[in-house]
Image (cartoon, rainbow, N blue to C red):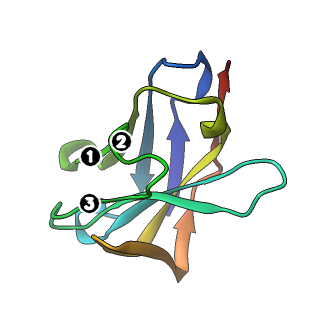
C-alpha cells in the first residue's frame, strides 16, 4: 500500500493550491480518507476527512469555508482544494487511510497508512 501526496508548493497569501493523495494497493472507495498537517514545532492537526459514502465531510474550524475535500474513485485519488490560503496554513500536509470520519471530527486508525507529506508554504 502506498499513498502519495502532491500539489504542495509556495504560494502567496490569498492564493490557492490543490493537493492530491493518490493510492495504490488500496481501494479508496472502501475507506474514509483524512488530511492532516503539521507545522514546525506544532502537533499534527486533522484538517479534513471524507467518508467512503462522501457524506458529511469534516473540516476543522481553521479551514472551514476555505478548503474542500473530494474524491475521484476512477483515479483512486482524494483531493484537498485550498483557497484563500493564509500564512498559518503553512505546514507539511499528509493524507491517511483509513480514518474514522464523522461530521464532528476524525482520527486515524492505528493501522492507517500515511503518505510522505507535501510541503505547503504560504507567504505573507
Along the line of sight, the residue nearer the viewer: 16 or 60: 60
Q: Residue furthest right?
A: 41
Are discs 2 and 1 less than 8 Å apart at CB? Answer: yes
Q: Residue at x 39, y 72 (%)?
A: 105
Dot 2 alpha-carbon crowd within 10 angstroms: few under 14, some 14 to 19, many 20 or more:
many
| Residue marked by disc 2 | 79
Q: Which residue corresponds to mark 1? A: 70
**Residues at marks 2 and 3, CA–CA distance in whole angstroms:** 12 Å
Circle nearer the N terminus (3, 1): 3
Disc marking residue 57? 3
* Badge 3 vs badge 1, beta-carbon distance below 8 Å: no
Residue 11 falls in image quadrant: top right
SS category of the residue bearing label 2:
strand
Q: Residue at x 68, y 18 (%)?
A: 124
The first of marks 2 and 3 along the sequence is: 3
Q: Residues within 10 Å of mark 3 (few under 14, many from 20)?
A: many
Q: Nearer the viewer, mark 3 or mark 1?
A: 3
Amino acid at each position: 500500500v502506498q499513498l502519495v501526496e502532491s500539489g504542495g508548493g509556495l504560494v502567496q497569501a490569498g492564493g490557492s493550491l490543490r493537493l492530491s493523495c493518490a493510492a495504490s494497493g488500496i481501494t479508496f472507495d472502501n475507506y474514509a480518507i483524512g488530511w492532516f498537517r503539521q507545522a514546525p514545532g506544532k502537533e499534527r492537526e486533522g484538517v479534513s476527512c471524507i467518508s467512503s459514502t462522501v457524506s458529511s465531510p469534516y473540516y476543522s474550524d481553521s479551514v472551514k469555508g476555505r478548503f474542500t475535500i473530494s474524491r475521484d474513485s476512477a483515479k483512486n485519488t482524494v483531493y484537498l482544494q485550498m483557497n484563500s490560503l493564509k500564512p498559518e496554513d503553512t505546514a507539511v500536509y499528509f493524507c491517511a487511510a483509513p480514518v474514522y470520519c464523522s461530521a464532528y471530527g476524525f482520527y486515524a486508525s492505528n493501522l492507517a497508512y500515511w503518505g510522505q507529506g507535501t510541503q505547503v508554504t504560504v507567504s505573507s
